[in-house]
Image (spheres, rainbow, N blue to C red):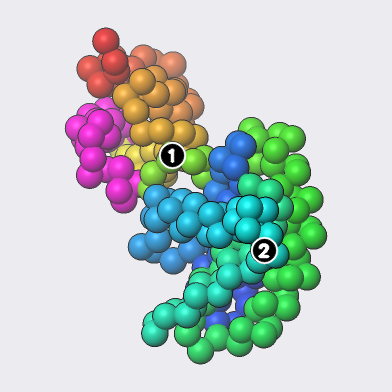
Amino acid sequence: MDELLQEIKMLPGVLGVFASVDKPDILFSYVPAGYDHETLKLMGVSLQRIFKMNASCQFSVNSVEMRFSEAMVLGKFICDGSLLVILCEAEANFSLINMTSNMLLGELALGVEKVRANPDAALQATSAKKAGSMDFAQAQNEEPLKSAIPVLQDALARAIGPIAAMLVKEIVGKWLQGGLCAQERFSELVDLFCQEIGDATLENEFRAETEKILPR
């Protein structure tokens, strides 16, 4: 799925691209900063409603184009429960983007089958995010993560030094892709940090310092 989306992303005039797959509810996205996960989900749900009207209204709509003054959105039906969305510059070569994406729909459908057959493997893709997950930029300003990050960063700095801030963003970002941002998942987050520390004594100290953020 990654390679197919990257092929579309490289087309002239394409700002970003994402594919949504329901059951197991995963988004594969390469989009500009500012398009958070929740926005993409809402966009995908809105387009899915249009495609689902085909059966009830005896339509045959497999592609939707929306033009705005600053950008263009192209949505394409991949298969039941899955769609492709391409964000383009307003003056992009629509014919080229439309033709290329149409040629890839068959391969994308096969990719969706693989995702549904092995969701855990699919989530390892660079572009994959599980539905309900958040971006680090959003999550760090909301509870429960807002209060937890200073604790994690201080404890990690004592274990590995000044690169702690960079690693916190990287590791928390990875954790967010695995599901909801919930305190009930903090033990999983602590485990990810300990994997990076790689020293039994320092790991134990880190766990002791971060125990206060775990659910009781």
Residue 117 in sight: yes
Q: Would you identify the image quadrant in which residue 167 lies? A: top left
Horizontal relation, residue 171 to residue 213: left or right:
right
Count neighbours of disc 2 (C-alpha within 10 A) and say few if under 14, some if 14 to 19, many if 20 or more.
few
The image shows residue 77, relative to residue 130, as above or below, that is below
Q: Is residue 132 left or right of residue 12?
A: left
Q: Position of residue 116 (x, y in %)?
A: 70, 38
Q: Give the residue furthest to the top.
A: 216
The location of residue 28, given as percent across then percent down, is 57, 52
Q: Residue at x 47, y 85 (%)?
A: 90
Q: Is 79 drawn above or below residue 24 in the view shown?
A: below
Span colored in magenta: 136-160
Dividing the picture into quarters, in which one does residue 96 lie?
Answer: bottom right
Q: Is tag 2's residue or tag 1's residue first in the polypeptide sequence?
A: 2
User: In this rendering, would 85 be left or right of 163?
Assistant: right
From the image, give the main secondary structure of the stretch colored magenta: helix
Check contact, mark 2 vs mark 1: CB within 8 A. Answer: no
Residue type of the residue flagged with mark 1: Gly
Q: Position of residue 188 (x, y in %)?
A: 43, 23
* Residue 57: quadrant of the picture: bottom right
Q: Secondary structure at mark 1?
A: loop
| Magenta-span inclusion, residue 195 | no
Front-lying residue, 154 or 14:
14
Label 1 CA crowd tier, 10 Å (few <14, some 14–19, many 20+): some
Residue indicated by mark 1: 132
The residue most toward the front is 57
Distance from Cα at disc 2 to Cα at disc 1:
31 Å
Tell me which residue sits at (46%, 33%) in the image.
179
Residue matched to label 2: 59
